[in-house]
Every structure is written in C-alpha cells, then in structure tokens.
Amino acid sequence: MLPFEEADIIAAASIALEQSSDGSDPDLDRVCAHIKGLDPTGRRFAMVLRDTIDQLLNGEVTGRYDWKTLFKTEKTHAGTLVEINLQREFAFADGVEMDYQIADVDVDCKYSQQFGGWMIPPEAVGHLCLLAWADDYSSRWSVGVIRIRSDWLNRGSNRDLKLTIAAAYRDKIRWLWRDAALPENVLLHMGGEDRKAVFAAGSGQQRLNELFRRVRERRIGRNVVRTVAQQKDYMKRVRGNGGSRSALKAEGIIIMGDYASHREIARSLGLPLPEEGEFVSARVVPASTGHESAARVSLGGRDWVLAQPGDVVEPAPTLPSHTRQG
C-alpha cells in the first residue's frame, strides 16, 4: 500500500481527470442517476439496511433485538454485510479498484451505524464512495455519494490509516436519501412492560399471540416474528388453523398480511399497509351507533370499524386469502 502522502498526490491527479474544469462531476451524476433509477423511492435500500441489522441480531437463534447487545466483532462485520447485501440486491458488478462498478464507474461502499463515522481508506481518495448510515434507535437511514478528497478528511487516523470525512465537508455528500424512515424494529421500540409480557409467554405460539395482542396498528416485520417465535415454522404460527389469527379471533383481533386483499382492508381502515413479509394487527367491531364517522370495511356481509377502548369485544371476521402484492 502506498504511504498516505503519496496516495494524496496520485489521487489529486485522478480528481483533476475525473472532474470538469467548472467543478462538475459527470461520473458522480451518472452514478447517482443510475442508483435512483434502480430504486426511485429508496424502499429497496431501506429493506437491505433493515435486513442486514436483523441478520446481525440473528433473533431466531439468539432472541436479540437491540444493536447494543451485539459483540464488537459483529458490529465490525456490519459494513461488510451491507456491502455484500447491496451488491446482491442491485447486482452491482465488482469494481476494478473499489468495491463496485456502478454505471461503469468504480465506487467504494462504506457503512456506519454512527452518522459521520465512515472509515475511508487511503486508496479511496479520488474515487467515489457510496455512504450508508442506519440507526435502529431513531429508525432513520441515509445514503449518499461523494468523491473523496484528501483535504476533506480528518487528519487523525486509526492503525489502518483509515480517515473520516470532516464535519465541515459533509455538505459535499450528494444525498440520495437523507433521514428517511427505516422500517421499525418493533421489539426495540415497544413499551418495556409490553415487551416483558411478550417474552414471558410460554411457547413460541403464545409469545406471538401476545405480540399481536399488544402491538396493534403498527407494521410488524418478518424478523420480529422470527425473533419472538424462535421456531423454524414461525410464519405458520401467524396464520389461521391454529396460529395467531385463530387464537385472537375471539378477542376481535384481525391480522393483515401482505396479501393484496389484506392491504385493501388495512387501507379502508386507515391503517399502515403491510409490505412484503409484514403484518398489521387491529381490534375491530361491527359498525353501529357512534361509529358513523369511522373508517370502515365490509367483511362477511357486515361493516367493521376499528374498536375504541370502550367497545364491547366481539369475535373478528375471517379475512380473505388471495395473492400477495407483487
């Protein structure tokens, strides 16, 4: 590896070649446009970051749901997993000198759970870097692209000679998504007493029942279900025929999944729409006097509305089961 000072000189020449005389950067423009074309809304990036955090937590085996419970070596491995999982999701080609080639441009990939903590190696100076950040505690994430310049880096270095981008130069990052909503880690953000009650329930099925009973009108992801159930057939534990849908029906609770018909029910009731692998539970009652202005849905020949605290519990209707969202 070149000494950092020598790398600076070479990189400076590279920057001069890559950037136009007016300060524009056609390669950066092209890379950003290509990424936005692959993921216009950022949904795919958000899910990769969510899934990578869940992959590290490995809740099905460990029961963990909190980043702070990871070992130091696991946290260190997060950047590599994000790099791998983004390449799998978007089929980025291998780079010549950096991690990827995106729109025929070499791009390095850096992830940090701490905003601004991206560790930049000397060999990345002069190249484009895709910077990713996600924080489970605030449920936010960001992704941007920057061309690394040595004078934008903090001079203090770790033993690997990796540097960080100085705070004064973070405005040079071309943000594709900034402080976007990360799919919620429900177990992390639910109330402590509710979480204790969920994990205190005996079997995996009972824990799931308690989860859907206590966490209503919020998206619950597949990995949350896996962590609570801690069983290989965890998805079966949600469905009817003995799963949580059957167990909670007498309590007036319906559990909507990612079926198109279920999403339409959620939409009609004004609830969050479950995305792929997600569920939303809610308690419903037949529409009656006092519910005139409430959002409603027709199921089984009756109109149903979201239950209010004082509403008498009535058995829930059976939900239709059709094809999932494409």
Image: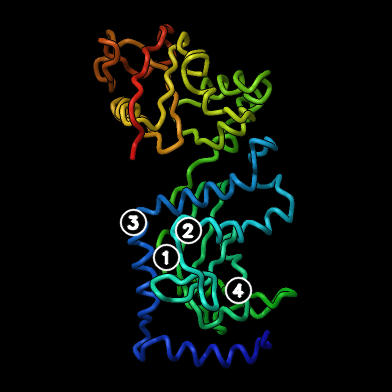
Mark 1 near mark 2, Cβ–Cβ under 8 Å? yes
Please name which of the two marks, 4 or 2, marks the residue nearer to the observer: 4
Scheme of colours in the image: rainbow
Which residue type carries mark 3?
Pro
Residue 190 picture location, percent across and down: 57, 32
Sequence-first disc among 4 and 1: 4
Q: CA distance from mark 3 to mark 1?
A: 13 Å
Which residue has dot 1 on it? 175
Comparing 308 with 63, the one in front is 63
* Residue drawn at the location 50% of the way across and 51% of the way down: 48
Q: Which mark is residue 120?
A: 4
Which residue type carries mark 2?
Ser
Mark 2 near mark 3, Cβ–Cβ under 8 Å? no
Which residue has dot 3 on it? 40
Label 2: few (<14), some or many (≥20) within 10 Å? many
Comparing 157 with 243, the one in front is 243
Please name which of the two marks, 2 or 3, marks the residue nearer to the observer: 3
Sequence-first disc among 3 and 1: 3
Q: CA distance from mark 2 to mark 3?
A: 14 Å
- From the viewer's perspective, is 306 left or right of 190? left
- Report which quarter residue 175 is drawn in: bottom left
- Report which quarter residue 280 is drawn in: top left
Secondary structure of residue under mark 3: loop
